[in-house]
Image (spheres, rainbow, N blue to C red):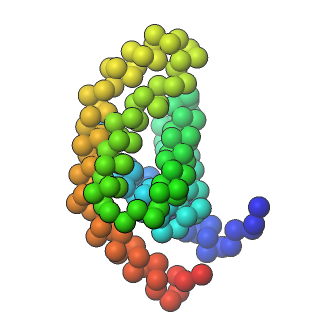
Amino acid sequence: MAKLKVQSITRIALLGALLYASQLALSFLPNVEIVTLLVVLFTKHFGKEGTLSCFVYVFLTAFTWGFGLWWATYLVVWAGYSLLVNKLRKIDSWLVWALINAAFGLCFGAIFSVPYIFVSPAYALSYWISGIPFDLVHCAGNFAMAVILGKPLDLALGKIKNLPQNRK
């Protein structure tokens, strides 16, 4: 594995902290978050650094709420979504990204319930079904965030990334 430079480590830490702060800022709204949109933006603009920032975000979240089965799933879900975004990073349409983010929000509870299958399949199913109303809110919130903020944040991040001091 290639060594990370100080600038890269700093960027990963700051992006992860921004993911965490944005999640906390909207935590008063159940399942409405901007983290999904930021993961898309960070991955599109910074590639591997965007994915690694997901790990920072999940660890900061775990330090706040405690470590449990949920945090391992969180780690897989967010890093996995970033890897998916990396495969789709050439997509330029923010309507398409809004639909992808909405689908992620809708599937979040189902993905999150997978580890509970090993505890009890009935429990996993009931866990997922009881969370469907929250998944619908998550879906709508992700869609709205991407439609409203996706393109402006994408353009702003592109300008910031292309400042002379930020070029690699």
For image coordinates 45% across by 13% down, the residue present is 123
Instruction: Identify whether 47 is placed above or below 72.
Output: below
Nearest the viewer among 48 and 19 is: 48
Residue 46, percent across and down?
52, 67
Nearest the viewer among 117 and 75 is: 117
Where is residue 30, by image quadrant? Answer: top left
Residue 136, percent across and down?
26, 34
Horizontal side, residue 168 vs residue 28: left or right: right
Horizontal side, residue 93 vs residue 75: left or right: left
Where is residue 2, by image quadrant? Answer: bottom right
Horizontal side, residue 85 vs residue 2: left or right: left
Nearest the viewer among 9 and 138 is: 138
Residue 4, percent across and down?
70, 68
Instruction: Identify whether 133 is placed above or below 44.
Output: above
Instruction: Tell me the quadrant of the picture where the N terminus can be found.
Output: bottom right
Where is residue 48, by image quadrant? Answer: bottom right
Q: Which residue lies furthest to the bottom in this view?
A: 164
Nearest the viewer among 136 and 71 is: 136
For image coordinates 40% across by 19% down, the residue present is 127
Residue 22 appears in the figure: no
Instruction: Identify whether 119 is placed above or below 128.
Output: above
Residue 123 appears in the figure: yes
For image coordinates 31% across by 49% down, the residue present is 99
For image coordinates 29% across by 31% down, the residue present is 134
Horizontal side, residue 33 vs residue 74: left or right: left
